[in-house]
Image (cartoon, helix red, strand yellow):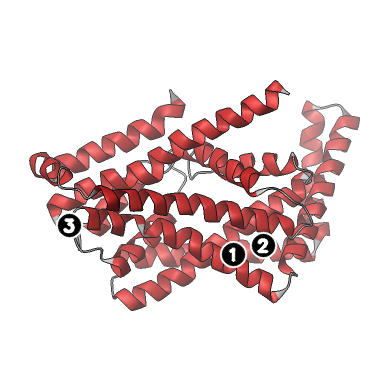
């Protein structure tokens, strides 16, 4: 039942929004939708999957590992499924780490690749939020507070990460402090082996991060551009949906709102940020989209960006598991 919590919360949130925006009007709007533009909205989300897979493959190649685009795509979709049913989408990262380890990476180096993804995303969110807030003129106290808290949190995290990489003896000291607790649940020799293994993987993690950061300028620019492509394709989905319902796309406003929503959705409260995403979307888009359109916009947007992740991700996960256990 816990695995379906995100779905239930999302559906309940959408139904509540439909109720608040007059269901009779909403359904009349649905019947007038342009199917070609709805297909475009879904294709934009599919590009989000594709660009993410290309970026993952490129980052992995920086560590002298090779995976096919198909495998990177499967890894991305399988992780999307787990992300959709875990708070703050946290379940996606371990899946990607495991699938990279299956292709020859160590846990430490695979974790470095996934952390690099998330750092690139975070830096893009902060930079893009500042740029699009300036370009659109669309801002709320809520959005400004969200951006500021996220920026401060990111700076603190990067500072700790830098210290951990620059002075690995500090991370070793933290692991050593865990040794007495491990001895209480494991035999002394096994506890010692576990601590040594963790230290080794942390060093591999640090080395991999340095290797990723020390790539050529052209490679780093390519990854930055891919990160922008990943998120801009996703952030254009609501604009395509709005056009499908004969509304102005409000591109600049919409992208600014999407940046606030994606940052808020990182709060680990509900599976797949269900409820949080819908409520944030309703609150922000009601400021520039007509009341009778915002309800259906939230419903269709969530169908394309959340429920499609569940459905397609489940199919890919089943395929990956079948391939693994049939061999």
Q: Is residue 127 left or right of residue 187?
A: left
Residue shown at the point (56%, 28%) measured from the top left: 318
- The residue identified by callout 1 is 156
Report the front residue among 305 and 258: 305
Kindly indicate whether the residue at mark 3 contacts the one at mark 2 (C-beta within 8 angstroms).
Answer: no
Which mark is drawn over residue 242? none
- Distance of label 3 from label 1 (alpha carbons): 44 Å
Q: Element under label 3?
A: loop
Q: Quadrant of residue 5?
A: top left
Most foreground residue, 196 or 4: 4
Q: Is residue 52 left or right of residue 32?
A: right
Q: Position of residue 242 (x, y in %)?
A: 24, 56
Question: Relative to residue 317, is residue 261 drawn left or right?
Answer: left
10 Å crowding of disc 3: few (<14), some (14-19), many (20+): some
Q: Are marks 3 and 1 in contact (CB under 8 Å)?
A: no
Residue, disc 2: 160
- Res 182 quadrant in image: top right
Task: Report how far apart the C-alphas of labels 2 and 3 lie in the structure.
Answer: 49 Å
- Asked whether residue 299 appears in the rendered view, the answer is yes
Whether residue 266 is visible to the viewer of this picture, yes or no, is no
Q: With respect to residue 248, does 98 lie above or below?
A: above
Instruction: Measuring from the top left, give residue 270's x and y in whole percent.
Output: 42, 39
Label 2, secondary structure: give it: helix
Taking depth in this image into account, of 37 and 149 the one nearest to the observer is 37
Mark 1, other Cα within 10 Å: few <14 / some 14–19 / many ≥20: few
Q: CA distance from mark 1 to mark 2?
A: 6 Å
- The secondary structure type at the circle numbered 1 is helix
Q: Which residue is mark 3?
A: 246
Residue 70: x, y in percent? 62, 44
Count neighbours of disc 2 (C-alpha within 10 A) and say few if under 14, some if 14 to 19, many if 20 or more.
few
């Amino acid at each position: 039942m816990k695995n379906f919590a995100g779905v239930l919360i999302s559906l309940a949130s959408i139904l509540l929004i439909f109720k608040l925006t007059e269901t009779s009007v909403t359904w009349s709007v649905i019947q007038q939708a342009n199917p070609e533009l709805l297909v475009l909205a879904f294709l934009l989300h599919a590009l989000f999957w594709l660009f993410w897979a290309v970026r993952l493959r490129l980052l992995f190649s920086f560590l002298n590992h090779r995976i096919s685009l198909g495998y990177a795509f499967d890894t991305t979709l399988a992780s999307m499924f787990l992300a959709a049913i875990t708070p703050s989408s946290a379940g996606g990262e371990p899946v990607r780490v495991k699938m990279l380890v299956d292709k020859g990476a160590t846990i430490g180096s695979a974790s470095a690749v996934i952390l690099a993804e998330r750092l690139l995303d975070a830096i893009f969110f902060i930079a893009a939020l500042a740029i699009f807030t300036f370009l659109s003129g669309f801002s709320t106290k809520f959005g400004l507070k969200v951006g500021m808290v996220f920026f401060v949190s990111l700076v603190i995290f990067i500072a700790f990460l830098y210290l951990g990489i620059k002075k690995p003896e500090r991370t070793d000291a933290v692991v050593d402090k865990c040794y007495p607790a491990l001895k209480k649940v494991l035999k002394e020799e096994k506890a010692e082996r576990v601590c040594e293994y963790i230290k080794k993987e942390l060093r591999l993690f640090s080395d991999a991060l340095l290797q990723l950061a020390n790539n050529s300028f052209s490679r780093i620019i390519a990854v930055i551009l891919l990160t922008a492509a990943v998120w801009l394709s996703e952030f254009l989905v609501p604009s395509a949906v709005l056009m499908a319902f004969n509304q102005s796309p409000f591109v600049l406003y919409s992208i600014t709102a999407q940046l606030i929503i994606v940052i808020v959705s990182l709060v680990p409260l509900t599976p797949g940020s269900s409820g949080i995403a819908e409520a944030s979307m309703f609150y922000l888009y009601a400021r520039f989209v007509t009341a009778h359109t915002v309800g259906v916009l939230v419903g269709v947007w969530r169908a394309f960006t959340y429920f499609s992740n569940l459905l397609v991700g489940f199919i890919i996960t089943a395929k990956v598991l079948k391939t693994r256990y049939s061999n």
